[in-house]
Image (cartoon, grey):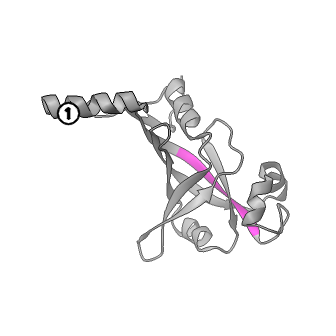
């Protein structure tokens, strides 16, 4: 069972695991109480407790976070066998300077008008918690795990799994 950690090292590990994952699944709650998930390309990210995403200001997800600010972000890097879920609160931010600062040219695929397009906004996600699964990724480790399961009936140790609380100051 995962323990809950509040230390800076655990928070840094979460950041390192999601830093290079370009797309996360963002889950919101719609007005009828149904979960809605969609892929979201992260804007430039920096370590800390805030994640940024571009969106259309009048999109359904923008309306959903105005109605219920709770969100879940799911990150997956199967190549490294790293998986992270991040929970937090989202808000729609209209800030042209911040949009310019976070803009990267690949965003133009979804937002052809660029960073200054008046139809776009930012989703600011303030992280309050995360859980990660950091599994060994080599073929040899998987082969060993399979062999152990077959011969002993016991699954291998899958790697690290911890819950990380971002609401307490890391010490």
Q: Dot 1: what SS?
A: helix
Position of residue 63 measured from the top left corner of the image (x, y, whole percent): 59, 72
Closer to the camera in the image, 81 or 163:
81
- 125 within the magenta span: yes
Q: Give the residue pinned by disc 1.
A: 149
Is 50 magenta? The answer is no
- Work out whether residue 92 or residue 102 is closer to the camera in this orientation and state it: 102
Q: Which residues are magenta?
A: 120-127
Please give the name of the residue rendered at 64% of the width and 73% of the height, measured from the top-left corner: 59
Visible in this render: residue 92? yes
Give the residue at x 82% y 49%: 101
Q: Position of residue 100 (x, y in %)?
A: 84, 54
Question: In screen coordinates, is 7 left or right of 62?
Answer: left
Horizontal and vertical percent for residue 78? 47, 44
Q: Residue furthest bottom?
A: 32
Question: Does residue 70 sit above or below 86 in this rendering?
Answer: below
Q: Which residue is painted at 28% across and 31% down in the image?
A: 145
């Amino acid at each position: 069972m995962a323990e809950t950690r509040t230390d800076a090292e655990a928070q840094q590990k979460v950041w390192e695991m999601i830093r290079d994952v370009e797309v996360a699944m963002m889950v919101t709650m719609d007005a009828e109480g149904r979960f809605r998930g969609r892929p979201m390309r992260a804007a430039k990210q920096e370590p800390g407790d805030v994640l940024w995403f571009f969106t259309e200001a009048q999109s359904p997800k923008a309306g959903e976070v105005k109605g219920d600010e709770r969100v879940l972000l799911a990150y997956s890097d199967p190549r490294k066998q790293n998986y992270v879920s991040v929970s937090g609160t989202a808000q729609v931010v209209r800030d042209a300077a911040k949009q310019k600062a976070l803009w990267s040219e690949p965003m133009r695929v979804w937002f052809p008008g660029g960073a200054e397009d008046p139809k776009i906004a930012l989703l600011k996600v303030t992280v309050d918690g995360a859980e990660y699964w950091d599994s060994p990724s080599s073929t040899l480790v998987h082969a060993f795990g399979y062999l152990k399961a077959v011969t002993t009936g016991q699954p291998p140790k899958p790697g690290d799994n911890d819950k990380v609380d971002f609401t307490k100051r890391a010490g």
